[in-house]
């Protein structure tokens, strides 16, 4: 400490800062990029704060885009890359939950930094001035602490989303939550009801794809999930006491999220996969819980949540499909795996196997061995099936509806049934997926071969 903090800025960022400064304005990189640089992480973007007004910024650069001019943000284009340059400002209330209702520009960097949520996000930097750290953000980075700028309860009162953001930053950086912030969240979590579904989804998503998705537990402990994801609280309350499980359903879920790669679809699938268990729980006299058929209930709940959090249709559909098939155990034979893939849909069978692995990794280590062996076999067979290009769906049969009509079959609902029957036979033996064989077999099945 003591010596000047050095952050290496990209050339284009330096050029923007220099241009602003050469014209007599103040200019700094601020927020996430300063935090990430100090942590030795690659910043996702470089935000610039300046004393220049949006109009002055536009006048200084040949290519700009008015991204959010009412909020003071102009995007400066350098070649094809855009950099957000925002005039120092003080925010009004965030009642739409997305942008502050009103912003006031200010000539004072300190005021701009003071409106920011957490100390680690409230630092500015320039080569000339070094690190500007008015709230102890540098020290909090060293201590691994997410702490509000100023009074936690006031800051959460201004914008309730900050409570979820606090946990998200903890999960991204492996940090802890400052005690005052934790207490304020426990008291104020219900304000999250006022925040739009889109903003909540965006933060939840960042939390889940972070290196510590299990820190969702922190959102549970502080009462955040009770408001935005009560289905999770039900899992934390559900004990399992089976031979396969040593944790509550909720702890098992956290474990499975850690065990799958940081992909947003897959992390959400793990979050949802057992949500039906509390609904299905049956306790036998020996104290063991069973959850027969829970995957279907989980899928219903997953659909409700993806609707509520306004997921895009494609992600929601894949998510729900994966949840609904997650407890299948295809037999580890070529036919068994083909039937498994036909059941899940071949497009998601590879993802299904990843879900399977993560689900096993969240179970009692004592029972993992045989399951992992089974999985390795299925994975190997699946690779061979892909390489051979075995037919796995009606669409891949060597005959289609049109061929059957040309062959004299009347169109109608019987057609689909017949194709399913042919697929069933081809799944058992891929050698049967040949046009002549299938046509002959279809005649036989519909009783049109009586003359032969
Ligand atoms: P990420 O890597 O996720 O982009 P970030 O720190 O850049 O992290 P953003 O959400 O992009 O986070 O916000 C940029 C900066 O704006 C933050 O670092 C913080 O200073 C400030 N900020 C963003 N959202 C809020 C908010 N709701 N309340 C107060 N300050 C905020
Ligand atoms: Mg950012």
Image (tube, helix red, strand yellow):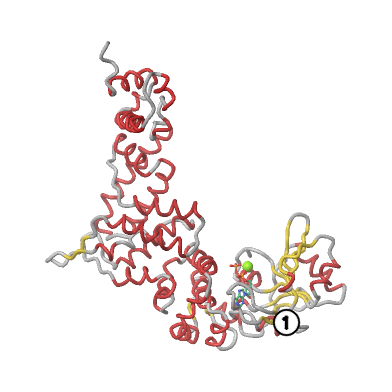
Give the residue displayed 27% in from the left and 60% down from the top. 364
The picture quadrant for ligand 1 comes to bottom right
Choose top left, top right, bottom left or bottom right for residue 39.
bottom right
Q: Is residue 226 positioned above or below 431 on the image?
A: below
Q: Nearer the viewer, residue 1 or 229?
A: 229
Considering every residue shown, the one lying at the far left of the view is 285
Q: Nearer the viewer, residue 163 or 209?
A: 163
Considering every residue shown, the one lying at the far right of the view is 23
Is 358 left, or right, of 133 in this rendering?
Answer: left
Choose top left, top right, bottom left or bottom right for residue 341.
top left
Is 347 left, or right, of 416 in this rendering?
Answer: right
User: Which residue has dot 1 on it?
Assistant: 104
Give the residue displayed 28% in from the left and 67% down from the top. 247
Relative image position of residue 256 (x, y in whole percent): 37, 60
Q: How many marks?
A: 1
Q: Is residue 338 positioned above or below 250 on the image?
A: above
Relative image position of residue 210 (x, y in whole percent): 50, 64
Q: Nearer the viewer, residue 399 or 269?
A: 399
Relative image position of residue 135 (x, y in whole percent): 63, 85
Give the residue displayed 32% in from the left and 22% down from the top. 442
**Circle 1 — which element?**
strand
Q: Nearer the viewer, residue 383 or 103?
A: 103
Location of the C terminus by quadrant is: top left
Count residues near mark 1 (Cα–Cα under 10 Å), then give few for <14, some for 14-19, many for 20+.
few
Choose top left, top right, bottom left or bottom right for residue 323.
bottom left
Location of the N terminus by quadrant is: bottom right
Give the residue displayed 68% in from the left and 79% down from the top. 102
Relative image position of residue 177 (x, y in whole percent): 48, 79
Q: Is mark 1 within 8 Å of ligand 1?
A: no
Is 70 left, or right, of 405 in this rendering?
Answer: right
């Amino acid at each position: 400490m003591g010596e000047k903090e050095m952050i290496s800025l990209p050339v284009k960022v330096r050029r923007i800062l220099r241009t602003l400064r050469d014209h007599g304005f103040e200019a700094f990189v601020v927020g996430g990029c300063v935090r990430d640089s100090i942590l030795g992480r690659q910043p996702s973007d470089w935000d610039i704060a300046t004393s220049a007004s949006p109009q002055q910024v536009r006048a200084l650069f040949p290519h700009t885009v008015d991204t959010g001019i009412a909020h003071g943000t102009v995007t400066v284009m350098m070649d094809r890359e855009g950099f957000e340059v925002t005039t120092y400002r003080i925010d009004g209330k965030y009642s739409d939950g997305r942008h502050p209702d009103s912003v006031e520009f200010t000539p004072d960097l300190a005021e701009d930094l003071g409106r920011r949520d957490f100390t680690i996000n409230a630092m500015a930097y320039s080569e000339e001035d070094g690190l500007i750290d008015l709230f102890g953000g540098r020290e909090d980075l060293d201590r691994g602490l997410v702490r509000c700028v100023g009074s936690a309860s006031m800051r959460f009162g201004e914008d309730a989303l900050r409570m979820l953001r606090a946990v998200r930053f903890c999960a991204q950086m492996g940090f802890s939550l400052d005690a005052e912030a934790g207490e304020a969240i426990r008291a104020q979590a219900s304000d999250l009801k006022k925040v739009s579904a889109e903003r909540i989804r965006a933060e939840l998503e960042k939390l889940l794809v972070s290196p510590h998705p299990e820190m969702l537990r922190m959102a549970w402990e502080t009462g955040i999930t009770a408001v935005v994801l009560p289905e999770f609280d039900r899992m934390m309350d559900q004990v399992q006491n089976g031979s396969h499980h040593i944790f509550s359903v909720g702890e098992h879920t956290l474990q499975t999220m850690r065990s799958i790669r940081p992909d947003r679809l897959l992390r959400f699938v793990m979050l949802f996969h057992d949500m039906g268990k509390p609904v299905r729980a049956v306790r036998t006299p020996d104290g063991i819980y069973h959850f027969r058929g829970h995957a279907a209930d989980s899928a219903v709940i997953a659909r409700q949540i993806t609707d509520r959090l306004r997921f895009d249709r494609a992600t929601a559909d894949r998510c729900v499909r994966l949840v609904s098939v997650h407890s299948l155990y295809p037999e580890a034979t070529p036919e068994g795996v083909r039937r498994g893939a036909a059941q899940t849909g071949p497009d998601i069978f590879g993802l299904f196997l990843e879900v399977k692995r993560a689900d096993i990794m969240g179970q009692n280590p004592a029972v993992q061995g045989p399951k992992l062996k089974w999985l390795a076999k299925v994975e190997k067979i699946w690779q061979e099936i892909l390489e051979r290009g075995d037919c796995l769906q009606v669409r891949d049969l060597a005959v289609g509806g049109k061929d059957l009509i040309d062959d004299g079959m009347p169109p109608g609902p019987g057609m689909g049934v017949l194709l399913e029957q042919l697929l069933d036979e081809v799944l058992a033996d891929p050698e049967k997926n040949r046009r002549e064989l299938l046509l002959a077999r279809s005649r036989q099945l519909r009783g049109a071969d009586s003359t032969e």
